[in-house]
Structure formats: C-alpha cells, structure tokens
Amino acid sequence: MNRKIRRLHRSMGAFIAIFVLMLASTGIALNHSDDLDLDKRYLSWNWLLQHYGVTQLKADVAYSLSSHTVSQFGSQVFLNSIPITQSSTPILGGIMLDELMVLATQDALLLFSQQGEFIERMDSTVGIPIMVQKIALLDNDVVIQTTNGFWHSDSTLENWQPLSTNEISWSESNVIPDAVDQQIQLYFYDRGISIERVILDLHNGHIFGRYGVWLTDFWGVFLIFISLSGLWMWGRRLV
Amino acid sequence: MAIMNSKKLHPMRLILGVLLFLIAFSVSARGVYQSNQDFLDETFEQVVPKSKVIWVKGDVRQTLSELLGHPYQGMRVRYWQQQAKSVWVLDEIGKTEAITFGIVIVANKIDSMKVLAFRESRGGEIRYPAFTQQFNGAQLQGQQLDRHIDGVSGATLSVRAMTSVAEVALYLDNIINQ
C-alpha cells in the first residue's frame, strides 16, 4: 500500500510540476502587479486579440475630404482618428466648404470646423430639404440629391433651390487609409490586452475558456492528492 | 374545484403582468412627441420667421458651461425671433440620452416650455403639462431661475437637464436682446 501510494505520489508529482510552476510564477507576478505595472503594460499580438474576441472593426463608411478622412463606425464618427460626434443615422457623404466641413445624413447636415469641432446640426427647420441621399460641391454651391430631386444652396446652406443637372461629382464612400484605420482601432481597443489580464487568466485557467477552468480544477484535485499522500507518507515514516 | 383553481390569479402571472406593464410604460416614455418643425409651426401659427444664429464663443461659451455643468456641444445656437418672442430648440443629455426641448420666451420670460423628444428610459414624466407649467413666467435671477422647480421622483436628472436648458435659453435671449 505504502509503495503504491509512493509510486503514485511520484508520478503525479512529475505530471503536475509544469502546472505548479505556472501557478506559482503567475501567482508571484500577480502579487507584484502594481510594482511591475502589469496593469499598465499591454500585449497587442494579433492571435491574442483574436483569442480574446477582439477582432478588427471595419468602418461602415469612409469619405476622403480634402486631405482628411471622415469615417463612421456604428454611431461614432471620426475625422481622421479623432472622434468628433455621434450620429445614429448613416453619414451619406461630406464636403469641405470654405472653413467648414459639412456631413450629410438623411435628415440633416452636420457642420464642423475643419479641425472637427462640432458647430451645428441643420435640419428641415432651417430649410434643409429632407430625405437626403448624396452631397457634392458644384461651383462653390452645395448640392444635395434627395428623393425629390437635386437641390443647391450657397455657402449659408439656408437658400435651397431646385437644380437640374447630372454632371455632379458626388461624395462617395471610400476605403479608409491603413494608417488612419490603425489609429481608430486603438481608440476602440486601447493598446491591446493588459499583461495583468493575461497572467490572471493563465492563473485561473480562464485563458482556455470554460474547459480551462475545469482543467485548473483537475490540477487542483491532483495537488490535494499529492499533499495528502505526502503527509501520509511523512506520517508513516514518523511511526 | 379544478375549474375554480384555474381561474385564480397565479402570483407568477401577477408579477409577470406587472413587469410587462412597467416595461410597456417605460418604453412609452420614449419618443418624439412633436417634431421641431411642428413645434415652430404651432408657435408661429404656420408663419415661421427665418432662423438666426448666435455663436457660442468667449464669455457666452463660459456661461453656458457653467449653466449646463459641462461644455456646450456646438459652436452656434439657432433661434427664431419675432418681435419680443424668441424660440429655441435645444438638446441636453438627461442621464445618457439627449432630450429635445422647445422653449418660447416672450419679454425675457418663459412663455412655455415643452419636451419635444425624450430618449431616456426613465424620467419621461417631465413632459406632462403639470410639470412643464412650473416654468411658465420664469425668468433669470442672476444665473438661476427666479423660482424653485419641484422635482419628479425618478426623474432627477431629466428635471435638472430641463432646468439648465431653461436657464440657457433665458440667458441667450438676454444676449440677443442686448
């Protein structure tokens, strides 16, 4: 009996040595998380981000306006990588007008400074034609296409008149430049996953999902057995 | 007996019914009660004057920040004016969502104030006339309303937003009449 337990104790000890090493080292690291700034240091490996379900977001729409890029991710609207406003309705296009940036939505024009400061939302109460579909600039006039035809206004955006022409270069959705896209991804996902989070998940098994927790429990049972068998053998030796 | 039992109201059904009622009530609090255009048409009896703008810069921006408790989102505010009457349509966040208010000011006093759109899940009671009529006749005393506005249970933030917007509209009305 004694020999059997001793053999089992030895083989199980070797089996869980790796687990004990990982548990001990991650435990020590977590104990000194503040000293090591583990919660302020981040890992942004692609496979790790994917493992944590942090997948690459794609812009719903993106427009090139002069040297700038306006993009929309859900309700968040960006000028380059700067979040400038929320819009529950899709941005349908945009133009640069003198000192202004004008973005079109279905029911309003959103006005910004060229630095992205929000100025005003202009809707039908100030004469903007409703059911906007597209926006363009034509000879310093702003042109919009609505379900009721084409309309144009001077730079005040308050004097809309019907327009009959087809030679308009509309603001069309474009591909968002890689550099801008990478900066926007940082906005959503910060700098990645904190080292503290990864170590904590290694420590408690959560990094392997639901099965990881069961696996940790399994190792825990092994450790309990080894502890008890060790105590039993030690006790026998004393006797 | 079995038939009698089946007619009894089971406690779980009662709880479910109450929950459904509460959900339905809270959902009904959200919505656009009057479009901005309809509000203007009603206020100006279908002849809406051309809108004007006031730029939010310098001291005006500073004062709006103090009244609202946060920076004003936007660089200009649009209003409609006819003789001594000015009309403002302003948005302010209640808790997390914007509430749209329509404010009519006559001779530096609030003539009427309405909730045009309410998007929060709670606090929609501020739209009822019993509450909004507290603002009628209010004017600024310093940077605050000249009266206490009674709160509504469960709508503290919405009431605060409405009070701040009333003060903002009165302040801006003073500016355009200077």
Image (cartoon, rainbow, N blue to C red):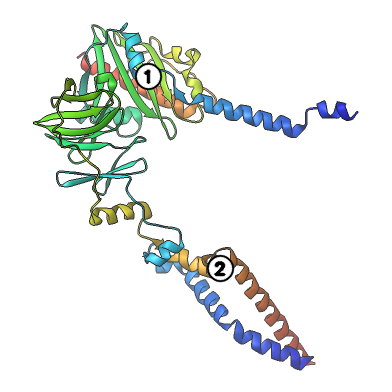
Mark 2: few/some/many CA within 10 Å (<14, 14-19, 20+): some
Q: Are marks 1 and 2 on the same chain?
A: no
Residue linked to disc 1:
B35
The residue depicted at 80 percent of the width and 92 percent of the height is: A239
Q: Position of residue B14 (x, y in %)?
A: 72, 29
Subunit that carries the residue with mark 2: A
Of B46 and A31, which appears nearest the observer?
Answer: B46
Q: Is residue B104 visible?
A: yes
Quick check: B105 left or right of B15?
A: left
Q: Distance from label 1 to label 2 (Cα)?
A: 54 Å
Q: Nearer the viewer, mark 1 or mark 2?
A: 1
Secondary structure at badge 1 equals loop
Quadrant of res A56: bottom left
The residue depicted at 18 percent of the width and 46 percent of the height is: A68
Amino acid type of the residue that numbered disc 2 sits on in the rendered structure: Gly
Location of the N terminus of chain A (image quadrant): bottom right
Q: Which mark is residue A205?
A: 2
Quick check: A233 left or right of B171?
A: right
